[in-house]
Image (cartoon, rainbow, N blue to C red):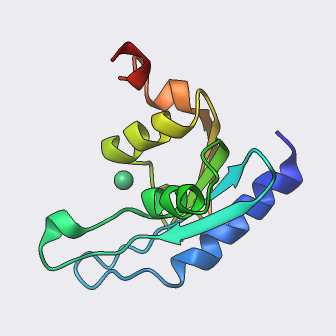
Amino acid sequence: MDENIIDSLIEAAKEAAKYAYVPYSSFPVGAAVLTDDGKIFSGTNIENASFGGTVCAERVAIFKAVSEGHTAITALAVYNENTLPYPCGICRQVMTEFSDDMPIIVASDYSVKKHRLSELMPCAFKGDIL
Ligand SMILES: [Zn+2]
């Protein structure tokens, strides 16, 4: 994958993290997705006093893209300043819905790791078996 695109995704995720609403965890995360037509959508984690209402940055970014008609996600970056913020299981499942096997870039200010969705979500449950 083009390094310039990876850098753009990380930068968009980093910018989004500035707007994290994290009064309970104080763990801001930003995410950005690339769509098949080259658009970037970003999101941040949004917490809620009823913890079940909390939504991760990755899902916010994906849902922003999907809600504007972009259902083919071709890459995703997720960012926290200090720690590599690996996506949770729910986010990995949502990623599976909108990508077959996209690159997942996990980034902090100190490290960047590149994975494939199939590596982070092996034997995924997919709608095509329904
Ligand atoms: Zn998540």
> Residue drawn 21% across and 68% down?
53
- Residue 95 position, x and y percent, is 49, 41
> Residue drawn 54% across and 84% down?
18
- Residue 85 position, x and y percent, is 45, 56
- Residue 9 position, x and y percent, is 71, 60
Question: Height in image: 116 above or below 57?
Answer: above
Which part of the image, by quadrant, shows the C terminus? top left
Question: Height in image: 47 above or below 68?
Answer: below
Closer to the camera in the image, 70 or 62: 70
- Residue 78 position, x and y percent, is 55, 57
Would you say residue 126 is visible in this rendering? no
Question: Height in image: 56 above or below 127?
Answer: below
Which part of the image, by quadrant, shows the N terminus? top right
> Residue drawn 12% across and 73% down?
50
Residue 103 sits in quarter: top right
Residue 7 sits in quarter: bottom right
Residue 10 sits in quarter: bottom right
Question: Height in image: 95 above or below 63?
Answer: above
Numbered label tally:
0
- Is 15 left, or right, of 47 in this rendering? right
> Residue drawn 76% across and 59% down?
39
Would you say residue 35 is visible in this rendering? yes
